[in-house]
Image (cartoon, helix red, strand yellow):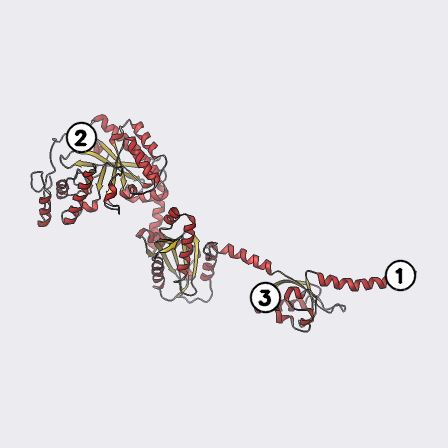
């Protein structure tokens, strides 16, 4: 029995001697045994799969010779720590050199078994995690970079900005600068050519911006069509402004997008600060304030932050908030300005002009809040209120006198024209006021009428079918061709005040007005001139055949009660009176008007 047990034990031992090496050779982990000084005493055969070496090649060499230089100091520190901690494990990740010269990421667990005579060494288990690290790096890159342009995104930019502002050892006079750039015309490209074209343009813009930045400057895409530039050390305070100019110039040559030339314009906001007195959020906010100012100046502009800009922006934001609900709170008003028939002096129409009775700032003119309303979309609500109120007032006048004024004119914004329910809204306002459609004229800017947007063209056509009249406002202020007037759905042209103001001193303006009047009449359109402020202007406009005049020479915009009194007085004036001129006869030919221009003569106000 004893002999049998001895043979079994011997067989078991032999099996284990064969089995354990097989396990080690086929294990996923590589096993390494190190001397106390880091010399490799044993490497399992898996090392060839992991690093390309045979096990025998590394025996007797220092393990530290394989470690990546950037990981060496940390690894040596951990090894020293491990020597002092018997039977404890140390886990780390490091890079080791492959036989082909590249580096592989390894996950390593080291155990101090120097105290065990059967081992007498540091046992290291390692496995290749290169693919996992590459995947993690891709995830980190994706989390911190814009997937389209591959530039740093907002998150990474803010991290870098915070790190820049907190760098130790900065000189007291060191400066950091932040530039925000916004593309003015990107939305137009996106809307007309599609998102793929827009994406292609953004990539090209990023590439071009990168090409004109100094070394060490960070460029990021914050989102949409907004880019940011961080200058980490500014030696010359004028440098950020010069860079802003270069960025704008770099974008001026055309881009080729899907085989077509595309032009873009840009606005840049610039802020420069002492890092020690600046928080990242405040720097970004101030740059955004400067950008807002640059966009207000116009295309291809930059603005440098000034504390007064912040105060103005806050006031604008407060006004924007107050504008919400202004109609519901009963703060909106309509003032009316007469349109006078130049041959008779009779008031034949009034234009409704929106005013806002601000609870703290008093009566505000449209120029002080209409742009805000456009930006927020409130223009639709304000326009709806103005339309209904003007129709109601027109009906009230009609009940008193069926003759004057024959028309009430209301302005429509481009935003309103694009609203699907505009025509139904106009019809409802007329019906509720029991007002004949022919007594309502809608004034639309030249730019809006000339648009080729299907919704706008359809709205104009349907409004004409409804029976209301249409006027092209501010004619001559845009870039439309006079030839395009043919076929436009309009009844009246309103000559922009820019041509009326210089009539007395600029013969060319009179020639232009005469040409517009002649062409409009040939097309069957009435012609009105706005901004008439003197008797001379009225006389010259009448001389070239202008039908109607509007301006302070006749009357300023008046509130409801005052305009009602004005209309009552106007109705009692004798019919057939002319607009009195410097000749005293009420008649002025074109030749006489041009003679007046040449001699600088003045008329007398009636």
Precedes in sequence: disc 2 or disc 1: 1
Question: In the rendered image, which quarter is residue 533 located in?
Answer: top left
Quadrant of the frame with the N terminus? bottom right
Q: What residue does disc 3 label? A: 103
Label 3's element? Answer: strand
Q: Is residue 283 visible?
A: no
Residue 517, position as x, y percentages in the image: 18, 41
Residue 495, position as x, y percentages in the image: 21, 42
Residue 241, position as x, y percentages in the image: 34, 61
Q: Nearer the viewer, residue 337 or 594?
A: 594
Q: Are marks 3 and 2 in contact (CB under 8 Å)?
A: no
Precedes in sequence: disc 3 or disc 1: 1
Q: Is residue 515 left or right of residue 35?
A: left
Question: In the rendered image, which quarter is residue 13 located in?
Answer: bottom right
Q: Is residue 400 above or below residue 101?
A: above
Q: Tell me the CA gap for discs 2 and 1.
A: 133 Å
Label 2's element? Answer: helix
Q: Is residue 316 visible?
A: yes
Q: What residue does disc 1 label? A: 5
How would you rate the neighbour count of disc 2 (Cα within 10 Å): few for under 14, some for 14-19, many for 20 or more?
Answer: some
Point out the frontmost of discs 2 and 1: 1
Q: What residue does disc 2 label? A: 568
Precedes in sequence: disc 3 or disc 2: 3
Residue 78, position as x, y percentages in the image: 63, 66
Q: Nearer the viewer, residue 280 or 473?
A: 473
Q: Residue furthest front?
A: 259
Q: Residue furthest left?
A: 584
């Amino acid at each position: 029995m004893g002999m049998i047990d001895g043979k079994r034990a011997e067989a078991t031992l032999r099996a284990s001697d064969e089995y354990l090496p097989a396990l080690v050779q086929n294990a996923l982990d590589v096993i390494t045994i190190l001397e106390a000084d880091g010399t490799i005493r044993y490497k399992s055969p898996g090392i060839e799969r992991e690093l390309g070496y045979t096990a025998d090649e590394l025996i007797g060499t220092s393990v530290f010779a394989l470690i990546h230089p950037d990981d060496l100091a940390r690894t040596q520190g951990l090894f020293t720590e491990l020597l002092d901690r018997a039977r404890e494990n140390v886990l780390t990740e490091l890079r080791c050199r492959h036989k082909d010269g590249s580096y592989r990421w390894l996950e390593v667990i080291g155990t101090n078994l120097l105290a065990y005579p059967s081992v007498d060494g540091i046992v290291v288990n390692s496995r290749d995690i290169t693919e996992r690290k590459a995947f993690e790096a891709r995830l980190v890159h994706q989390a911190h970079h814009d997937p389209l342009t591959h530039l740093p995104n907002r998150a990474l930019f803010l991290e870098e900005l915070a790190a820049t502002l907190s760098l130790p050892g900065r000189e007291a006079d060191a400066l950091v600068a932040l530039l925000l750039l916004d593309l003015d015309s990107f939305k137009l490209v996106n809307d007309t050519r599609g998102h793929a074209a827009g994406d292609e343009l953004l990539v090209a813009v990023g590439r071009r911006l990168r090409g004109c930045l100094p070394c060490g400057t960070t460029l990021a895409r914050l989102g949409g069509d907004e880019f940011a530039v961080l200058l980490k050390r500014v030696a010359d305070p004028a440098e950020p402004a010069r860079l802003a100019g270069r960025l704008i110039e770099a974008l001026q040559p055309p881009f080729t997008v899907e085989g077509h030339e595309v032009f873009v314009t840009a606005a840049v906001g610039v802020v420069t600060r002492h890092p020690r007195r600046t928080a990242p959020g405040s720097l970004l906010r101030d740059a955004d304030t400067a950008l807002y100012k640059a966009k207000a100046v116009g295309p291809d502009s930059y603005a440098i932050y000034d504390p007064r800009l912040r105060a103005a922006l806050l006031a604008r934001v407060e006004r924007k908030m107050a504008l919400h609900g202004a109609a519901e709170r009963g703060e909106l008003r309509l003032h009316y300005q007469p349109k006078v028939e130049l041959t008779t002096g009779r008031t034949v129409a009034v234009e409704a002009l929106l005013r806002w009775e601000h609870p703290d700032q008093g009566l505000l003119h449209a120029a002080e809040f209409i742009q805000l309303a456009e930006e927020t979309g409130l223009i639709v609500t304000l326009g709806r209120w103005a339309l209904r109120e003007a129709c109601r007032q027109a009906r009230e006048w009609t009940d008193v006198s069926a003759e004057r004024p024959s028309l009430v004119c209301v302005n429509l914004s481009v935003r309103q024209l694009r609203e699907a329910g505009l025509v139904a809204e106009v019809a409802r306002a007329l019906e509720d006021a029991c007002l004949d459609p022919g007594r309502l004229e809608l004034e639309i800017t030249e730019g809006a009428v000339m648009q080729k947007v299907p919704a706008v063209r359809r709205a104009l056509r349907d409004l004409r079918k409804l029976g209301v009249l249409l006027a092209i406002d501010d004619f001559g202020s845009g870039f439309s061709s006079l030839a395009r007037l043919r076929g436009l759905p309009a009844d009246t042209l309103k000559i922009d005040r820019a041509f009326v103001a210089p009539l007395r001193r600029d013969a060319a303006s009179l020639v232009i007005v005469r040409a517009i009047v002649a062409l409009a009449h040939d097309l069957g359109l009435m012609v009105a001139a706005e901004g008439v402020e003197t008797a001379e202007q009225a006389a010259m406009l009448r001389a070239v055949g202008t039908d109607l005049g509007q301006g302070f020479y006749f009357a300023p915009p008046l509130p409801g009660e005052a305009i009602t009194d004005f209309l009552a007085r106007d109705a009692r004036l004798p019919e057939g009176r002319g607009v009195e001129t410097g000749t005293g006869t009420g008649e002025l030919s074109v030749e006489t008007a041009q003679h007046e221009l040449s001699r600088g003569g003045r008329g007398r106000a009636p």
